[in-house]
Image: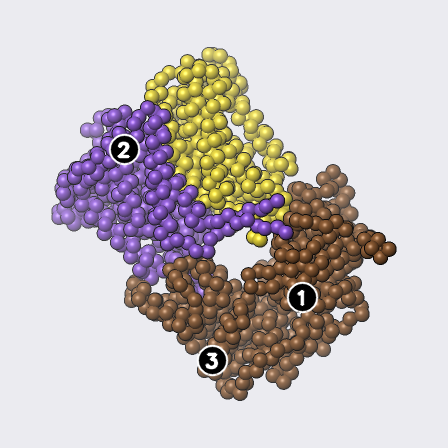
Chain colours: A purple, B brown, C yellow
Amino acid sequence: MNNYILSKKLKTNELSTFYSFLFGLLIAFFIGSIILFLQSNNPLEVFSLMIKLSVGSLNSLSNSLNKAIPLILAGLGISIINSVKLWNIGAEGQIFMGAIALNLVYINVTIGNSNLFIFILLISGFLGGSFCILLPALAKTLFGVNEIITTLLTNYIVFGLTIYLVNGVWKDPNSLNFPAAAYIDKSVYLPIVTSKLSSGFLICIMFTFIAYYLKEKSVFGYELRIAGGSELTALYAGIKSKQVAFIAMLIGGGFAGLAGAIELLSQTHRVSTGLSQGFGYTAIIVAAITGMRPIGIFLVGILFGALTIGGSVIQTIGVSSYLAEIIQASTLFGALIIQFFFNYEIKKVEND
Amino acid sequence: MYEIYSMNKYLLQVNNISKKFGNVQALNKVNFSLEEGVVYGLLGENGAGKSTLMNILSGIYMPDSGSIKIKDNLIKKLSPEIASNNGIGMVHQEFRLIESFTIKENLILSKSNKFQNNFEQTYKKYSEIFALNLKSSKYISELSVGEKQKVEIMKLLFNNSSIMLLDEPTAVLTPQETQQLKISLETLSKSEKKTIVLITHKLKEIREFTEKIYILKNGNMVAENINTNETKDIELIQLMMGEVNRREIKKDNIKGKAKLEVKEVSLYSNQNLEILNNISLEIKSGEILGVAGVSGNGQVELANVICGLVKNYKGSIVISNKDVSKKGVKTRKKLKLSYIPENRLGIGLAPGVSVLDNSAIKEYFKARYGPHLSSKKLNIYLSNLINQFAIKAPNVKAEISTLSGGNMQKLLMGRELISNPDVIVASQPTRGLDFNAVEAIHELLVEQRNQGSSIMLFSEDLDELFKLSDRIIVMFEGAIIKEFSLEEFSIDKLGLAMAGINE
Amino acid sequence: MIDLQFLGLLNATLQAATLLFIAALGELIAEKAGILNLGVEGMISIGAVTGFITAINTENIVLAAIVGVLSASIFSSIHGFFTVILKQDQTVSGLILTILGISLSSMIGKSYVGKKLEVKIYKFGGANEPNSVLEVFLSQNLIFYLSIILLIIVSFIFNKTLFGKRIEAIGEDLKASNSMGLNINKTQFVATCVGGAFAGLSGIFLTLSYVPYWTDSMTAGRGWIALALVIFGGWKPLRTAFGALLFGFLEALGPRLQTYGFEISPYLIKITPYVITIIVLVVLTILKKGNTGAPKNIGVPFFKENR
């Protein structure tokens, strides 16, 4: 009789996350191909169309990059919070809350200088996201309440709040077939960089560096890492674990709130239930695939943005846009399976 | 004729068992035989191989060589299930009871429970033997530690174990509970014909509980089946601890004013049990105070109190004439206290975190420029550590557990000592390390001593204590039972004190 | 004279509650064994769409139900594989499955949107409008009664049987369970699949009776509510059933509020279950100092001892 046991490998390959991602992508496209086959579609035809219409022209590339913005920002927020081993499942709600906060300020405050106004609005968005995660953050750091469930529930509360607002106080009488808030004025639209690329993308790049700096180079990031490793060690190091975890959660929520604000100012131009189509959830996948690395999140975010655009355009040839989501989710799946083999080995326990 | 006789005599026969872990020979051709209905003691210091032997018997570890016979049947492959089916059961120091379940549930859920159908009867019988006056519907969380242990032992009885291995059972019991256990074990062995093996380092227990003794030392069985009442304590200690190789170092160090003073420190647990009992001591500058004692007598708690990790205690801690009793870790660090905890990975080092990050725990604020942490400075700091302390760390960004035990300890020590602290609290600093690493660490400590540090050295290694200490105190059951000056160092006296015998 | 509107509300409550309860009960089983399955939403979806497609193509309700339940169960076995066999992070695995489940269902179900179902799950009481509370209870459809039976069976198993207690033991303490000789991997894997089967049952109820048609995103977050329900119910089947009734009531109340002359926006009513759950969760955690009744080992993978 042989016993097999699972044991963690001592030496892990530095690039294992990257390789896992590549393999995962392969596996995902393989799964996608099978699904397409079963629906009597030609995978090659579909994939090449996806690629062509998502990155094939300047126009489509801009669309993809725009689509990537909320994924990247929310993903960065998730990665900051995960430094201290906590999960933010509430990015979706924080995105909406960012947009709501922005709209609230927009309605009640007028600032002549439109650049300044945009700046203030973006900050409001950031703060809105932080506000959204405030209760779960307090509950976790003060009382140890599971943050996965609380952040998840706030998604529904905020989404419900959004529906309430766009059907009630903020209802735009001019929007007949779809309840939404009134459009904001063109003066506060985020300016376009080139083609259709929103300057929000530049903000995105900036915040990627901010997230990278916070996580890797700052004292704060260091304290998060130690606190995430062991509370007792953090105690000995003189680090206030609960405080840094709380701040990390607020910052992470803020990133997602900012994503919502940018979506409003550059894409939808108004608060509506269609502001985010699951970006907050997809962002979790983006963050997880890259092992919570900011630079990776930026790159994978772009890839996933392109996939999403690709997914929406293949509807024209009759393929469901959900193919994109399936590929995204399967990439992480595949990556996890491959990562498993990098991390663990199956040892045979020998008997006499 | 002799063979027929020996066939019936031994319930369990272990012959020439050896087990190696990496480079360490944990057990070397060990013999161990048990008769029915006898209470045995397995004596040995920490690291002697007791746990390894027990784990082999209960089927968790596989021996490298040797044979195991149960009732004259040669067991080819011993697994936890097979061990259990053959009547071997073990009670570990950490209980395996489900806190939120009742006593009854913990007993009947086990798949090896043989008394499913007459639970109440069996429960009544055994709870009488153990004087456990509790309904089986009581929750484990409501039980005292002693009561929980009784339930753990009852688990073995419900599984119909004929050989019961008890790992340091009295470590967690009050004197009264210990008495009760003795009576219960007597009944079990005489009336129920159970074979009991008590694993312990406490001489008092051996005397009171056991009929026969086996002694393990450094993986070798140095005494087999000797009668308890025919041996003196001193003989047992000598067999267990043997000759102490006193590697001499110069003890002409100059001592100055006391840098660490502990004044009447007492600590109570959540259940109001006394963990530390009125501890007072002082350590002069340039002095090494050795703290001897069997693990579990309050050493970890005392170290944590001194270093500020535990706060609600009575008494005071004074460092370099400043009372830090109400202050936390940061203040003590500023007064140049360094702590090398027993629990390396967990308190000293953060698991899941890189080598580089871990190396900076003590002084990371020195590498900060406002919000920025200079990785350049961190790397320089780590390079210094690596060079000075000969640490093998090929990839500084890799996770800390990729380092060997010895290198982790060197990193920990280096980190704590490089700043030339005034007070050093070192707990089991050389546990589990190879010879060279041990020597290197001893040198470090002596160097610090010569530079005027007050050093508190907790160790289970008497060799180490004799070699390094200027004085030795012995901790027993949360208090200082005896102090020994340099001239009074002797294995016999220390061993007795550690066993709680104060003559 | 009982208000007809009240009866209508009661009827809607029972139906909405059934839908939530079955999925919650399944998740409760998985969590009791220590596995957190965030993929419930995806599993309900898979059950819903496969059941619907089978019903449309074969007009055989029984077959449709079986297919729905089995598909969801098989889908959940992926989660079981990832978490129990590969010891991967349960949160991530569950989330992936939700996204995959919803996307896959939408993909498969695309060509069936708008199709009409000729057969439905059997409903007692015929076409007559119930005139009393008792009649409302007696004229529900099969799945409602099935859910009550399941409630009784699952409660019985966890409270009165050794089998159920052993599952609970695994969720509480892995080391102790292992020393008791319990087969942890097998139990956790099976519990996950059973949870998935329940989610599938909820799904076919959705498309073969409650709604009854197929469209995108029709699960509407009920899977997440089911997760919250398990916590709300303190991991006890009966309390979870009451929670389901409460949430079902709130769901049924929303569109009916205007008829009662209430000024509260139905949209706000819709979010009250979530608000209540968070409050309850926080309060429970504070009061019980962390002991909310949650299985202690939830989310923790089990590694056998080395060497």
How many angstroms separate mark 2 from mark 1 (CA)?
A: 69 Å
Of B326 and A17, the residue lying toward us: A17
Tell me the chain of label 1.
Answer: B
Quarter where residue A189 is shown = top left
Q: Is residue B114 visible?
A: yes
Chain at numbered mark 3 = B
Q: Secondary structure at mark 1?
A: strand
Image-based side of C102 in relation to A211, left or right: right
Mark 2: give few (<14), some (14-19) or many (20+) Cα within 10 Å: some
| Residue on which the image places disc 3 | B447
What whole-number distance in Å separates the C-alpha atoms at marks 2 and 3?
69 Å
B462 sits to left or right of A145: right
Q: Amino acid at mark 1?
A: Asn
Q: Nearer the viewer, residue C304 or A292?
A: C304
Question: What percent of the width, then of the height, locates residue A159?
Answer: 33, 36
Total tally of numbered discs in the picture: 3
Identify the residue position indicated by label 1 in the image: B220
